[in-house]
Amino acid sequence: MSNNYPKIHNSAWPGVVGKGPDSDEPFIGLDEMIALTAAAEVDGTKFDGIDLFLYEPHVNIDSSDDDIKALADKLQANNLVAGSVCAPIWPPTGGGSAMGDSEECGRFVDTVRKACRIAQNLRELGVRPSGAVRIDSSVDPATWSADPDGTKKIAETFSRSCDVAEEFGEKLTIEGEICWGGMQSWKKNLELLEAVGRPGTLGFQADMAHTLLFLLGYNAEEDALLPGDFDWSDRDQLESAFKTMTGALRPWTNDFHVAQNDATVKGMGTHDKTGRHCLPNDPNGKIDIPWVAGFWLREENGDLTKACRHICWDGCMFPNEVVLATDTANQILGALLSVREAHGWQE
């Protein structure tokens, strides 16, 4: 009998991130992202759910109870559940920097509150059995570097956000990316998580594409674990680097994104440069997906952590022609299933 955990989710944000009026690519609506997800199938297995971006035109962060109920009904009609939800905590969407002034930090926490309300409602409506509310520092590395108290300020805002999450029975997760100040390396994420010190409420969202760049020290050369001219065929050195990074961050990991990366960066629309997401079979991809996933999903002794009840594909900033191609969702589903077969379990 095949493993049935962790559950397998697609992501909705490739239709939104880097898209829209400030980009060369238009938005792809939530209905279309749900339809693409629901239609995918590999050897009789389909996606269990989809992780959501709480940002228009997908989901209004100020959605009414009726709006949330309509979203739940839409997911159920497509035999999907919701998983983790991304809170739009950035200034252009009404949020603010987590290390800004009191007004900015207040907007940040208010946005987290709104996201937790939607997440809780979806959970209580029976369409969100697992997942966290995703946040980041909402500040660039240069601004963070100029403030010696930057990490302390972010930690204070994140701690206030944890208080809010606990009111709603929710958990938060921070997605470390090279584009976020105070989160642009594996070590800086660890320092931030330890500064907040709320492991029961705030965890780490390990994205395989973003964390690969941590090894190379993009935006944080001092924390690099591999040389800039690294030979990607050197499996032993690569394994050592992964063990160092995942050994530090695995205990905090409460959300997991399967992804492929070619060890380059990409920016699109208003989104700053970060890890390039590629299709699973991209010839330039540097990640052996099931092998690398194991560093995050298994303890050093080989035991499964079972910390993530679902895993999600992150195709952030895929061109629309790739997102909409008929075989893309099936390729993604197949990659996720290979991870579940290697590192999953039965319930």
Image (tube, rainbow, N blue to C red):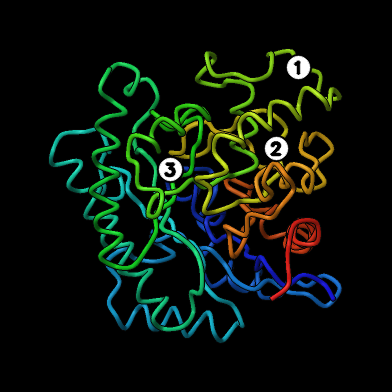
| Label 2 sits on residue | 261
The front one of 72 and 17 is 72
Label 1 SS? loop
Classify residue 136 as left or right of residue 117. right
Type of the residue with mark 2:
Asn
Which residue does the numbered mark 3 point to in the structure image? Answer: 22
Distance from Cα at disc 3 to Cα at disc 1:
35 Å
Q: Which of marks 3 and 1 is nearer the N terminus?
A: 3
Q: On the image, numbered disc 1 is attached to which residue?
A: 230
> How far apart are labels 1 and 2 at the CA level?
15 Å
Q: For marks 3 and 2, give the CA distance.
A: 25 Å
**Mark 3 or 1, closer to the camera:** 1
Q: Residues within 10 Å of mark 1 (few under 14, many from 20)?
A: few
Task: Give the amino acid type for the residue marked by disc 3 in the picture.
Answer: Asp
State the image coordinates of residue 182 (x, y, percent, origin top left): 39, 29
Q: Position of residue 106 (x, y in %)?
A: 17, 47
| Above or below, 116 relative to 173 | below
Q: Which of marks 3 and 2 is in front?
A: 2
